Image (cartoon, rainbow, N blue to C red):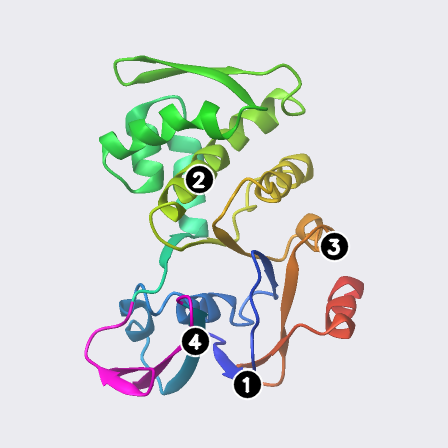
Amino acid sequence: MSHYILTPGVLRLSKLNLLFGMNNSGKTKLLHLLRSLSSPHLLMENPGDLSCAITWFDPELRNALVEVRGRWLEYQVDGRRVALPPRPYRVLSFGPEAYNRRFFRLKASSVPGVAEFLGVDRWTARTVIANMPVMLPDVMSDVIFYGDDVKISYRKGAFGGQEVGQVAGWFYALAVFAELQARAEPTILVLDEPFVHLHAAAQRHVLELFESATWTFQVILAEHSLTAYERRHHGWSATVLVPEGERRSRISQDDADLERLGGG
C-alpha cells in the first residue's frame, strides 16, 4: 500500500531545492502536488481527498487552491473558482523510469536520442543541442551536426573521467532545455531520483552543474542519495519527509530533522 498522506504543513521553495525521504515516505505524491497546476491528471491517477494551496508572484502575490474530492478536481484562483488550472509556471519533470530506460538505450550524441530523452520533437532537440556550447562555454567548445548525428567538442578538464562525461551529457541537455524554456516562461525542473544509476562523482558533478548562477529556472530534486544530502549547504534549500505513523509523513525544513536524516 502506498504511503502518500501528508500532514498539513508549509513548503517554501527557493531556486535550488532538495527533497529527501525514504521509499514510501510520500516524495512522489508531494511532487504531484507541486505539478498540479501544470499536470492535473497526476492527482487523479490515485484519487483521494486532499487540499493544497500554492502561492507565487506574477509579479504580485497570487494564490491557487487545489481541492480533490474523490473523482472531482476543483481550482480556485485568487478566491475565484475556475474550471481549468492556472499555469503560472511550466513544469519539466523526469522520473526514475525515464533514467532507467533512456540512459542505457538512447544515443546521447544524436538528435533523435536527445529528442526522445527530453520528450520533444527533433527540431526542438536540435535547437537544444545547438545552444549547448553557448550556455555551457566552460564545458563545450563546439557542436557539429552530421545529419542526425552530433559531434560535441568538450573542453579539456571539463569533467573528471570519461564515465562522468558520458552520463553528464544527458544533464547538460536537461539544463539547457530548461533554461531555454525559462526564457519564455517561468519554469521548474523536477527530477525524481535522478541518481539511481550514477556513482558519487557523477552525482556531485550534476549537482554542481545546477548550482551555476547562469540558470534562471528552479530545480526540485528528490533523492535519498548521501551525495545530495552532503551538498545541501551549497545553495540548496532542503526539505525532508518525516514518517509519522502508518501512511503519513510530515513536511519539515527544520535543521534538526535534516540532521536526524543524516544520522540514520
Count of marks placed on residues: 4
Q: Which amino acid is tagged 2?
A: Leu
- In magenta segment, residue 83: yes
Q: Nearer the viewer, residue 37 or 93?
A: 37
Give the residue at the far front of this rendering.
60
Q: Main secondary structure of the magenta part?
A: strand
Residue at image location 35% in from the left, 69% down from the top: 36
Query: Is residue 219 left or right of 41 when viewed as pictured?
Result: right
Q: Secondary structure at mark 4?
A: strand
Q: Which amino acid is tagged 1?
A: Thr
Q: Which amino acid is tagged 3?
A: His
Measure how far apart labels 2 and 1 are at the Cα level: 32 Å
Residue identified by numbered label 2: 174
Q: Verify CB contact (< 8 Å) between mark 3 and mark 2.
A: no
| Sooner in the amino-acid sequence: mark 2 or mark 1 | 1
| Sooner in the amino-acid sequence: mark 3 or mark 2 | 2
Numbered tag placed on residue 7 in the rendering: 1
The answer to which quarter of the image holds residue 179 is: top left
Residue identified by numbered label 4: 54
**Front tag of 4 and 2:** 4
Measure how far apart labels 4 and 1 are at the Cα level: 16 Å
| Sooner in the amino-acid sequence: mark 3 or mark 4 | 4
Measure how far apart labels 3 and 4 are at the Cα level: 26 Å
- The segment highlighted magenta reads 58-86
Q: Nearer the viewer, residue 60 or 14?
A: 60
Query: Is residue 81 left or right of 21 when viewed as pictured?
Result: left
Residue identified by numbered label 3: 233
Numbered tag placed on residue 183 in the rendering: none
